[in-house]
Structure formats: structure tokens, C-alpha cells
Image (tube, rainbow, N blue to C red):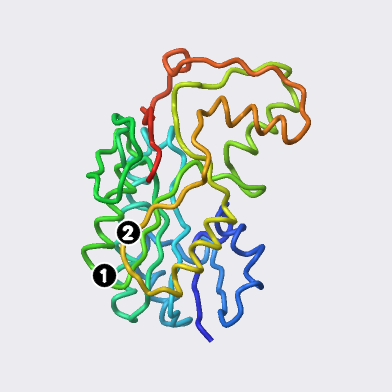
Amino acid sequence: MIRILVTGANGQMGQALQSISNQFIGFEFVFLASKVLNISNIEDCNRNFEHYKPNICVNFAAYTNVEKAEEEIELAYQVNAEGCKNLAEVCLLYDTTLVHLSTDFVFDGQQNTPYRISDTPNPINVYGASKWKGEQYIQHFLVKYYIIRTSWVYSEFGHNFRNTMLKLAQTKSEINVVNDQIGCPTYALDICHFMMNLISTKKYGLVHFRGDRICSWYDFAVSIFEENNIDIKVNPIRTTEYPTKAKRPQYSVLE
């Protein structure tokens, strides 16, 4: 039996994997929330690895609030960068394979063709920079790792764009959504299935995984309301009409 320790169990990806974990025969899952395993704390990491001795660690723990990261810079780096360093060090110590979820936001969004694995990251916000630093730590310490970059993750679980739109529709009859940022919505359960298939290949390294559809946030919002039979007016606006603290890539499609 292969034991998989999953960090960030209460987040969107953690909940998604828990919902289908019984489908994967031959794997024993240990789901740990941040209160049990704070990846920013090396003692926490060592204690849990010593207790569970996992064959594989799936890191779904992350600081994902792109806006707040511009203010909580230290916290974002503690989780997304130093947390990865801690996990990489204990994975090396216990000969554990690390699976880490990263983001399209490591790129600046200045090109108009899909980003390849070989393209050099150039993040334009704190969230993206902290995730890129985490990738670098993992690649520095480990050989047995999978880094999966993905984008615009959505599901029935946790905080994400889909759930935010559905919540807004409960109180509003009209909303504005940015139409000049382009990416690929990716279903969390699809990521889980891809990840589990990837683990079995033992082809270590960096990969990109994203949904098939290339669209704007406006397009995505419209489709969410259509699929849920919700009658709401959606107005397309430009990024300049919706100022935010964090810059967003205008085009972050992964190849």
C-alpha cells in the first residue's frame, strides 16, 4: 500500500481529492489540515513525516489570496516558498516523492501564445513570485518531484471563481466581469485524476495541466450562469475599469 500524505486538506484541492480518494486502489491517503500540519513550521513537517512515513507527499497547502498577498507579503512567502522548502527538505530526508501544485501566475502574461514549460517565469504579483520561489526550492533539493502548474481552478468546494459568481447571483441582478484577461478554467477533480495518473508514470519534473477551454473571466462567468440556469446580466469590462492591488497576467494560457 502506497501512503500519500496530503497537506491543505481543508482547501479546495484537498476537499476535491478527498471526495474521490476511494477510487484509487492501492493508495492510503492521510489528509492533514493546516492546523495539524503547518508547512511553514519545519518541526510540524518533521513530526508528521516521522509519524506517517509517507511514500508520497501531495502539497495542496497554499496562500492563494492574490489581492491580500500584496499586503501580507511575508505570510505569502512563508507558505508558498518557505513551506515548499520545508517539505522538500523532509521529503529528501524520508525519501518521499513530492507532488506540488503551482500556477499560471508565475508568468507575466505579456505573450499571446500558450506558455511552455521551457518559458522563463516572470511573475508580476506577490502571489506568483512566492509560488515561483517555491518551485525553485523544490527543484533545488529534490529529484523525485512533480510540479504541476495549472490555472483558474474551480469546483464545488472552497473558494473559487465559480462559487463566487453563484454567491453573487443570490443578491444581484447585474454584475461586471473583466473581459480582457485570458486563461483556462480547470476543474479540480480533473487535476486530481491527472495527478494520480502522473504519479504512476514516475516521470519526474515539471508539467502543465489545464482545461481545454481558452476564455476570459467574462466568458467563464456567462457559462457558469447558463449551466446553472441563472438569469443575471453580465457586463464585460476592461481590467482598467476594475482596479486591483495585484496585477494580473492578461494572457496566462498554459501549453
Q: Relative to the observer, which residue lies in front, 73 or 124?
A: 124
Q: Residue at x 57, y 27 (%)?
A: 219
For the point 56% across and 61% down, the residue is 9
Instruction: Residue 142: give its label.
Output: 1
Locate the N terminus by quadrant.
bottom right
Q: Nearer the viewer, residue 186 or 96?
A: 186
Residue 141 sits in which quadrant? bottom left
Image coordinates of residue 44 in percent, x first then y, are 41, 69
Residue 133 location (% of width, % of height): 27, 50
Labels 2 and 1: the sequence-earlier one: 1
Question: In the structure shown, which secondary structural element does the residue marked by tag 2 occupy?
Answer: strand
Q: In whole angstroms, how far apart are the C-alphas of marks 2 and 1?
A: 12 Å
* Amino acid at dot 1: Leu
Q: Secondary structure at mark 1?
A: loop
The label on residue 232 is: none
Q: Name the residue: 50% across, 82% down.
A: 2
Looking at the image, the residue that sits furthest to the bottom is: 1
**Total residue callouts:** 2
Amino acid at the residue labelled 2: Leu
Tag in front: 2 or 1: 2
Q: Residues within 10 Å of mark 1 (few under 14, many from 20)?
A: some
Circle 2 sits on which residue?
206
